[in-house]
Amino acid sequence: MTSDLGVDLGHLRLRGPVIAASGTFGYGTEVPLLERRALAALVSKGIFLRPRPGTPPPRIVETPSGMLNAIGLQGPGAEALLREYAPLWSAWDFPVLVNINGETVEEYGELAARLDGIPGVGGFEVNISCPNVEQGGMYFGNDPRAAADVTRAVRQRTTLPVWVKLTPNVGDIGEVARAVEDAGADAVCAVNTFLGMSIDLHAFRPRLSFRTGGLSGPAIRPLALQLAHQVARTVQVPVIGIGGIASPEDALEFLVAGCAAVQVGTATFADPQAIARVHDGIAAYLESKSWTTLKELPRYLPRD
Amino acid sequence: MFETSAPLSERRQVARDMFVLGFDAPAVAAAAKAGQFVNIGLKPGPLLRRPFSVYRADEGRVEIVLRAVGEGTSRLLSLREGDRVSVLGPLGTGFRFEPAWRSVALVSGGLGLAPMLLAARDARAAGLSVHWVHGARTAWDLGSEWDGEEATWATDDGSRGFHGSAVAAVEEEFGAVLACGPNPMLAAVAERWPDAQVAVETYMGCGTGVCLGCAVPLLAGGYDRACREGPVYRAADVDWPALPSHLSYSAVAMPA
Ligand SMILES: Cc1cc2nc3c(=O)[nH]c(=O)nc-3n(C[C@H](O)[C@H](O)[C@H](O)COP(=O)(O)OP(=O)(O)OC[C@H]3O[C@@H](n4cnc5c(N)ncnc54)[C@H](O)[C@@H]3O)c2cc1C
Ligand SMILES: Cc1cc2nc3c(=O)[nH]c(=O)nc-3n(C[C@H](O)[C@H](O)[C@H](O)COP(=O)(O)O)c2cc1C
Ligand code: FES
C-alpha cells in the first residue's frame, strides 16, 4: 500500500506536503541533484518589480546550528523573470509560486498584476517579512493594517493562489495572521527568518556588511514551530510551516501542530536531497501507521 | 555535479600545519577540472558544507589541501582512514586554457597552491609550457609537492628562494597568468596583469548557485556567484576593495 501525500491548500492541490522555501532554491533551475518527484511546489527567490543588486558581501555567516543571511533580495526583476524562468516553469509538473516584494503597497499590486496570467506562474507568496531590505519587507509584516493592505492589493490583481509569508519579528503574530486572512489570503506561511546579528571580534564590527541578517536553520525550529502553531490556532485558512526543518520528524512536528504543509530551506544547503528525504520519510511514516492519507495524521490544534 | 559519501583514503603532510586529504569519489574525480571545487559536508560537524579546491584528482580519488583554521577544517584533519564525508562536486567554473598562449605562469600564495597541480595538468594537456611561482611566509610553509616543470619559490622572510611575494617574484613574460591566494594578493595580481584568471574565496551557503550568499562584486556593477560563474574571474573584472578579505574575519584567540 502506498499512502497519498496530497494536500489541499484552498483551491490548490499539491502532490505532497513539502515545498521548497524561497531564496534557498533559486528559480528552480539549479540543484540538479534533487529528485523532483518529491517537490510539491517551489517558491522562487524573492523578486521586486525592478532588478536589484542586493547587499555587499559578506552576506552570510554561520552561527550555532544556523546561519544569518543578508542577501538583500538580489534579483533580476519581473521582466527578466517572465522571459527567462516562467517559460521553463510552465513545463514542470509542480507549481512555482513567485515570492513577491515591494517598497510600497502599490508596488506589490503592480508586480502581481504583471505576473498574473503568465504561463508558469502558479501563484504568489507575498513576502511581508524580509528583514534584509531598507524599505518594505518586514515593516509591512509588523503592522496588521499594512499587512492587510498589501494582501488586498495583491488579491485584487490576481485570481491565482495568494500566500502571505509572516515575520516572526512581531509582537502578536496571530493578529497579523488574522488581518491577512480577512484581506483574502488563501494560505499563510509561518515563518520567515528571525532578525539576528554576529560580531567580528577582529574588526570590532558586525560580520555581515548589512549589520543584521535573518537567522534560519535548526536553531530557529522550536521558535518557528510555536509561531506556526499559534497561527494555525488563529486562522481558518491553511498554514504552511517553515523554520529549521531538516528531517521527516521535524516536518511531522509542524504538521501535527496544525500546519497543512511545510517548506524546507536551509537544510537544502547541507543536503541537496533534503526535500526528497523529508518527503519519503513522511510517506514511510504514514505507511508504518497504515494511514492512507495525511488527513489521518492526528493534529494537536485546540481552538481558543 | 555529484554527491557521494566518500571515505578518507589518504592523508599526508605537505608543509608546516598543511595536509592533503584524499577521499574516494570516482565520479567527482573523473569530472574535476582545474579551479573547480568540492563542497564537503561533515556529520557530526558544522551545519554548512565547507568548500575546497580540488588539489588532485586521479585513480578515483579527490584530494584537497588544507590547514586547520576553524571547526570544519579541524574536524576534517581529525578524520581517520575510512571515515566518511559527503563530497558534493565538482562545482564552479574553473580556469580556461588556450593553446595560443604557448606559456602560462601559475602564481600562488599560501593555500592558493590548492588548484595549481590540476592547473599544471590541464595546461600541459592544452600544449602550454608551465611555470609555477609559489610564495609563502617561510620555507616551512611552502608545500612540498610539484610535478616537475619549472618552479620559482618566494618567501616573505627570504628563508627560501625569492625574498618577497610570489607576484613580485615573476620576472618573465608569459602568454597568460593564473593566480590563487588570499584576496589581497589577487588584488595585486589584478594591478599587474588585468587579464589574469584568478580564483577567489568567499563565504558560501550552498555552493550550488541557489542562495546568492557567495556574492562577488564586479567592477561593471552588481554581483555574481563565486560558486557558479566563479570562483575563477578575469582579475580586472572584480571590484577588489568591495570583496572582503576573509583573513580579517578570523576567530580571535581568547586568553586562557
Ligand atoms: C572556492 C573555494 C575554495 C577553497 N579552497 C580551499 C582550499 O583548497 N584549502 C583550504 O584550506 N581552504 C580553502 N577554502 C577556504 C575554506 O573553505 C575555509 O577555510 C573553510 O570553510 C573554513 O571552515 P572552518 O569551519 O574550518 O572555519 P570557520 O570556523 O568557518 O572559520 C575560521 C576562519 O576561516 C575563515 N573562513 C571561513 N570560511 C571561509 C571561506 N569560504 N573562505 C575564506 N576564509 C574562510 C573565517 O573567516 C575564519 O577566519 C576555499 C574557499 C572557497 C570559497
Ligand atoms: C539565503 C536565504 C535567502 C532567503 N531568501 C528569501 C526570500 O527571497 N524571500 C523569502 O520570503 N524568504 C527568504 N528566505 C527565508 C526562507 O524562505 C525561510 O523562511 C527561512 O530560511 C526559514 O526556513 P529554514 O530554516 O528552513 O531555512 C531566505 C533564507 C535564506 C537562508
Ligand atoms: S554559495 Fe550559494 S549561491 Fe553560491
Image (cartoon, rainbow, N blue to C red):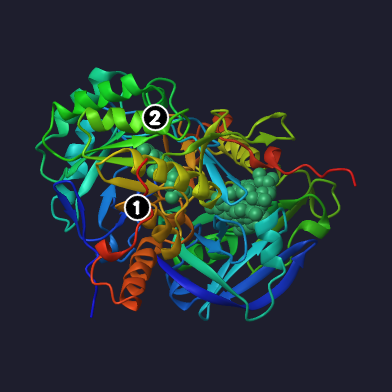
Mark 2 burial class by Cα count in 10 Å: few <14, some 14-19, many 20+: some
> Which residue sits at x=18%, y=38%?
A82
Q: Amino acid at mark 1?
A: Val
> Which residue sits at x=57%, y=59%?
B52
Q: Estimate the spatial distance between the alpha carbons at disc 1 and disc 2, rounded to whole Å.
A: 29 Å
> Dot 2 falls on which chain?
A
Q: Amino acid at mark 2?
A: Pro
Q: Can residue B171 be seen at all in this image of the molecule?
A: no
> Which residue sits at x=27%, y=50%?
A42
Q: How many marks?
A: 2
Query: Residue tagged by mark 1?
Result: A262
Mark 1 burial class by Cα count in 10 Å: few <14, some 14-19, many 20+: many
Q: Can residue B52 be seen at all in this image of the molecule?
A: yes
Mark sitting earlier along the chain (1/2): 2
Q: Is residue A4 left or right of residue A216?
A: left
Quadrant occupied by the N terminus of chain A:
bottom left
> Dot 1 falls on which chain?
A
- In the structure shown, which secondary structural element does the residue marked by tag 1 occupy? strand
Vertically, is A274 above or below B174? below
The tag on residue A53 is 2
> Which residue sits at x=65%, y=58%?
B72
Vertically, is A72 above or below B246? above
